[in-house]
Image: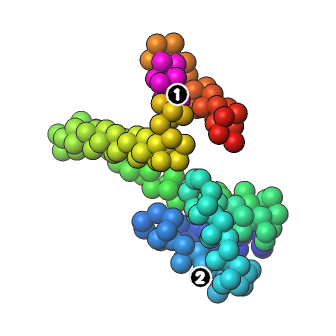
Amino acid sequence: MIYWQVFLAFFIPNMVGYGGGPAIIPLIEAQVVTHYGWMNAQQFAEILAIGNALPSPIATKMAGYIGFEVAGVPGAIIAILASVVPSILLMLAALGLIYRHRHSPKVQRMSQWVRPVIAMMMGWLAFSFLNEGLQQIGTLHTGVIGVAAAISLLHFRIHPAFVVLASLCYGALFLG
């Protein structure tokens, strides 16, 4: 029964919540603190603070931690799945709808408008990472990592996962 409760505690907020992690935090709190009473508001706030300090989506981190605290490793797995299943279902439904109407002129125009928007968003993300890198680790290290990554990717055609791994190793050796 506890596994079903863990699933519902994270599935419902992720299904009805709109706007990503920060928008569903109050919904998760209502389930975890008020409805099931697995923790008090102070404990939830502490988990939220720790979750905000770590990389990756906040709702998934909180689900994993709370699920583990309530029902061990199976609870963590169930809570994480409950957090991502709504997004997966909605993406599959949207993909199915778009694929079914892929030859429609409206869908083709929509695709033509989406590509430049995604390119701009990716460009902004890269600029934000560059700016943060310059502020956090300085020009020298940011330049070394950036130039080495560009040469590795463009000239030597090294898989991006290995470039990221090498960058992490560089950071651990020289910045840690």
Q: Which circle marks residue 134 in the picture?
A: none
Going by the image, does 121 lie left or right of 168?
left
Q: Which circle marks residue 30 in the picture?
A: 2
Q: Position of residue 176 (x, y in %)?
A: 69, 42
- Decide: is 67 above or below 35: above
Choose between 106 and 142: the one closer to the eye.
Answer: 142
The mark nearer the N terminus, 1 or 2, is 2
Going by the image, does 78 lie left or right of 30?
right
**Residue range of the region highlighted in magenta in the rendering:** 145-153
Q: Residue furthest right?
A: 72
Q: Position of residue 2 (x, y in %)?
A: 77, 73
Q: Is residue 3 magenta?
A: no
| Circle 2 Cα neighbour tier, 10 Å, few/some/many (<14 / 14–19 / ≥20) | some
Q: Name the residue beneath numbered marker 1.
A: 144
Q: Residue at x 53, y 47 (%)?
A: 136
The answer to which quarter of the image holds residue 96 is top left
Q: Is residue 147 magenta?
A: yes
Residue 83 visible, this orientation? no
Which circle, 1 or 2, is nearer the viewer?
1
Q: Position of residue 10 (x, y in %)?
A: 61, 68
User: Which quadrant of the rendered structure holds the N terminus?
Assistant: bottom right
Q: Residue at x 55, y 22 (%)?
A: 159
Kind of residue at disc 2 = Ala
Going by the image, does 53 lie left or right of 102?
right
User: Helix or strand or loop: what does disc 2 sit on?
Assistant: helix
Residue 155 visible, this orientation? yes
Q: Main secondary structure of the magenta part?
A: helix
Kind of residue at disc 1 = Val
Q: How is the image coloured?
A: rainbow
